[in-house]
Image (cartoon, grey):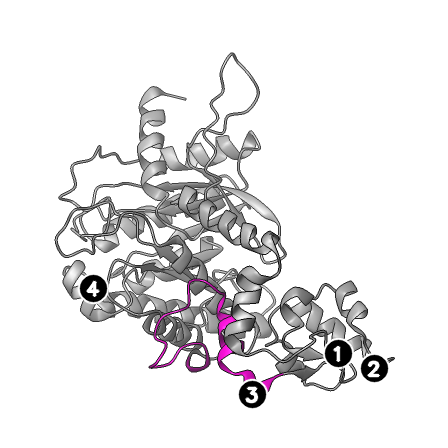
Amino acid sequence: MEDKVIEKLKILADAAKYDVSCSSSGGKRKNENKGLGNAEGMGICHSYTEDGRCVSLLKILLTNFCIYDCSYCVTRKSNDIKRAAFTVQEVVDLTINFYRRNYIEGLFLSSGIFKDADYTMERLVRVAKKLRQEHKFNGYIHLKTIPGASEELIKEAGLYADRLSVNIELPSEQSLQQLAPEKNYKEILVPMGSIKDQLVQAKEESRLFKGAPVFAPAGQSTQLIVGASAETDKQILQLSDQLYKNYSLKRVYYSGYVPVSSDSRLPIIMEPPIIRENRIYQADWLMRFYGFNVQEILDEHHPNLDLDVDPKLAWALRNRYFFPLEINTADYEMILRVPGIGVKSAQKIVSARRFAPLQFEHLRQMGVVLKRAKYFITCNTKSMLRQELDSLHIRNKILFGEGSKRSALLTQQLDLFKQVG
């Protein structure tokens, strides 16, 4: 590989790490003494498919030149950093060469904006088109859609990419005007709506015509930055809820703000809000798979998530009148809401109790975390508790009261978050 391409790869892979639509392994082990393999940060990251497989992607920017000056962004035009830009052919060659060496299984390609949205988007599309048509590349391709790009280019991008995404970044128009005044919500939501319409159209055509062209079969996603602006967790989750419902998004990704700028418009934080980001992901999971709505998770009295306990436990502690739940007769939807019971365990419970009344030992064998669930359930009217406890006592017992093991685990997790930050 030429030195200038290696230099570009270092710069543009490093710049891409702030996009969380797929995550980096973070390994930094170099290949020394002509050994085998190299985990140094050179743009290869891991992502997960719907069936749980972990795949490696080449994650890079086409360029980190940008005409915009978004205060939270490391590639903003006023930032004094090394700049670089790949040619279309260089990205194609890198992808093919890495794929043939079995380094990667796909490409994640985003970009700063060269001179306008269409000029940049056209180059992103050409990369995907060359890979598909000239090299018959059938690996995974995720293209970032440039806000403001024309509908024709977005439509063409969807013919070659598996997934398209348009990053919203900031959770409100007001914050966007304050921190990224050259952008506006309309330029972001219009392409998102166009992708949704194309997905619906492609699905209908595939029912009518066997050879109908496929459009972005892995759907669309977006990213929100957490902590760079003043929105509450409730506002962020309400926006996510609207995006899932109105634009049929597969995923909303949340990225804890990384302080890369000393701009006076940004909050002063010493480390990324990793725990907050993690709690928002958990709440997002509850909305998509556990039947919760935003108003149940957060309200005007609790606009932000409790950082010490997960959102499902926080909800259960605030709504003790639903519990204890008799596990042999409760509805599936309510079993899903018991802390310590996941989707698979809830399905096993509903299926197994048709044949015989369940005991606590049965639940343990099904994967239920009884250390949490025991405060909220009964089996055949029997409880594992010797006395009734209020919400505060349950919270303290789950966090600290089950011996030193749980306390040590919590401390270990908090330390881990600090290390990651």
Q: Earlier in the sequence, mark 3 or mark 1?
A: 3
Q: Name the residue under label 2.
A: 354
Residue 205, can we see it? no
Q: What element carries label 4?
A: helix
The alpha-carbon separation of the residues under discs 1 and 2 comes to 7 Å
The alpha-carbon separation of the residues under discs 3 and 4 comes to 41 Å
Q: Quick one: label 3, few (<14), some, or many (20+) residues within 10 Å?
A: few
Q: Looking at numbered disc 3 in the image, what kind of residue is underneath it?
A: Tyr
Q: Residue 176, labelled with which disc? A: 4
Q: Looking at numbered disc 4 in the image, what kind of residue is underneath it?
A: Leu
Asked if the residues shown at circle 1 and circle 2 are in contact, with their CB atoms under 8 angstroms apart, the answer is: yes
Q: What element carries label 2?
A: loop
Q: Mark 1 points at which residue?
A: 350
Asked if residue 302 lies in the magenta stretch, the reply is yes
Q: Looking at numbered disc 1 in the image, what kind of residue is underneath it?
A: Val
The alpha-carbon separation of the residues under discs 4 and 1 comes to 46 Å
Query: In the rendering, at what x and y percent does residue 404 appear?
Result: 59, 53
Magenta stretch bounds: 295-323
Q: Which of marks 3 and 2 is nearer the N terminus?
A: 3
